[in-house]
Image (tube, rainbow, N blue to C red):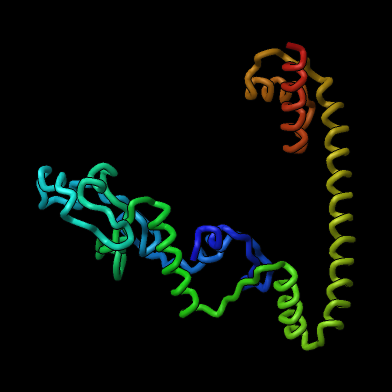
Amino acid sequence: MAQEELNQTIYWINESNELESGTYYEFLDQFVDETTTPKGVGPRDFIEFIEINELFSYINEEDLKDESEFVWDTATNLNGEEIAKLGGLWTISTWGVGGNHYKQGNRYYSSEEAAKLEYYKWLAIEWNEKYCVHYYVTEEEAEKELLRIKAEEYGVDIEVYKSIRKKEEFVKDIRNQRAQEEREKEKKRVQELVEIYAKLIEPVKGEKYGDTCVRLSKALKSRIESKVFHSTVKYLRRKAKEEL
């Protein structure tokens, strides 16, 4: 698995039978095993940086200068002096069973990117073994599979389901349009009232929000809707700023 593969955009069908897209990284993140840890809820297995003094707690500085010793892990292929220059190495550690049995990883990497790549390689293996979730390289492939699943849910063939979906989308568009019209109508109603009530007092430069509220309340003969009241206060404050 290469870095480019993990960064590529892919498509999958989630548990709600909805189409999602993202990188291969994001797809695999769904299958991260989380647990309660001393640091709160988090991934059971995680990437961390191990400082040089923790890696070589039993080795003195003179030993680290010997390039012929301490070749660590085939993943890094670094000797002690090279590791010392890095200040430490990255590894994949675990919180273990129950989230409170910490164990440091036994393979080390010279960069976080290298450790991350190895972590996701392992996660991909876990996903393949434990989960029946597939991904698709193209949106067309994913859409085709989603159609098949939806048609199966309705107990009809794909062409019949396409017709059903078209009607459902039409009804949804009509509802969205009506909802938008209602929102615009309500916005206009509130604005008309705001312009009426804003004439009761003058905008005051630098006035605090609460003070504007008090002045408007005193000027009103009766209580008005909360959203109209606060919209009026905000309107007055904008007017005051415009006059600066």
Residue extending farthest front:
68
For residue 118, above or below residue 205: below
Residue drawn at the location 18% of the way across and 56% of the way down: 70
Q: Does 175 sit left or right of 48 as displayed?
A: right
On the image, the x and y values in percent for residue 35 come to 37, 65
In front of the other: 64 or 44: 64
Q: Nearer the viewer, residue 218 or 173?
A: 173
| Residue sitting nearer the eye, 188 or 31 | 31
Q: Say which quarter of the image contains residue 223.
A: top right
Residue 29 at x, y = what percent?
A: 50, 63
Pinpoint residue 14: horizontal percent, then vertical percent: 62, 70
Residue at point 45%, 74% (across, down): 125
Q: Going by the image, does 199 lie left or right of 72?
A: right
Q: Establish if 41 lies above or below 213.
A: below
Q: Is residue 188 left or right of residue 155?
A: right
Q: Residue at x 86, y 26 (%)?
A: 196
